[in-house]
Amino acid sequence: MAGEIRFKRVSGNSDLPLPAYQTPGAAGMDLCAFLPDGPVIFEHGQFAMISTGFCVELPSGTEMQIRPRSGLALKHGLILPNSPGTVDEDYRGCVMVGLYMLGRVPFTIRHGDRIAQAVIAEVRRFRAVEVAEMSDTVRGAGGFGSTGTR
C-alpha cells in the first residue's frame, strides 16, 4: 500500500463501510450511497447528487477521481456526467456523487449500494508561461478527428 487516506463519517453515518478496494488488483475504492431518508428511484433523464456519508483528507499532491462503476453504467445506464469528478486535496466536505440516468428502465439506489469508485492519483502542478509561438508537431492544430479513425 502507498499510504493512508483519512475518512470522517458525516452525522448519522454509523453503518456504512469505509470506501474499500474490492479485490487486490482494483484501481478504485468503491463508494456507497448514504441515504438515511430512503432509496432514490432514478427515471430516464433524472439527475441527483448522492452523498457517500464521508469527508476525506487526501495526502498532499493527490486528488480523488470519482468514476462510474461499469456495471451501473453499462447494465442500467446510470452515469456520472462529470466523469471523472475531482476531489481536491484541500476539500474537507462530504464527498458527493452526481448520478444521471440514461437508461429507460427505472433503477433504485438504496442506502449502502455501491454507486461509484474513487481512484487516488498523483497531481503535478506547473507554472503557466505565456509564449508568442508554439513548437511545431506533425499534428499541428488539427482538432477532433484530425488523425482519422484507423
Image: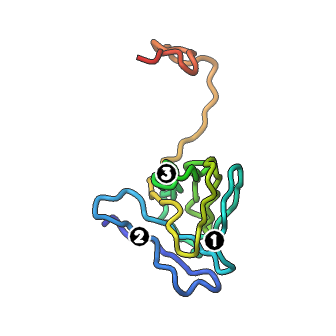
Label 2: which secondary element: loop
* Quadrant in which the N terminus is drawn: bottom left
Q: Report the side of 34 relative to 135 (left or right).
A: right
- Graded by Cα atoms within 10 Å as few (under 14), some (14 to 19) or many (20 or more), the crowding at tag 2 reads some
Front position in the image: 9 or 137: 9
Return the mark for residue 20.
Answer: 2
- Graded by Cα atoms within 10 Å as few (under 14), some (14 to 19) or many (20 or more), the crowding at tag 1 reads some
* Quadrant in which the C terminus is drawn: top left
Q: Report the side of 114 relative to 100 (left or right).
A: left
Distance (Cα) linking label 1 and label 3: 28 Å
Residue 97 lies in what quarter of the image? bottom right
Residues marked 2 and 1 touching at CB (< 8 Å): no
Q: How is the image coloured?
A: rainbow
> Mark 1 highlights which residue?
94
Mark 3: amino acid: Lys
In this rendering, the label closer to the viewer, 2 or 3: 3
- Residue 143: x and y in percent read 58, 19
Label 1: which secondary element: strand
Label 3: which secondary element: helix
Return the mark for residue 127.
Answer: none
Query: From the viewer's perspective, is residue 125 above or below residue 40?
Result: above
Mark 2: amino acid: Ala
Front position in the image: 105 or 18: 105
Q: Report the side of 62 relative to 38 (left or right).
A: left
Q: Give the residue drawn at x 54%, y 53%.
A: 76
In this rendering, the label closer to the viewer, 2 or 1: 2
Of pointers 1 and 3, the one earlier in the residue sequence: 3
Return the mark for residue 75.
Answer: 3
Query: From the viewer's perspective, is residue 31 above or below residue 38?
Result: above
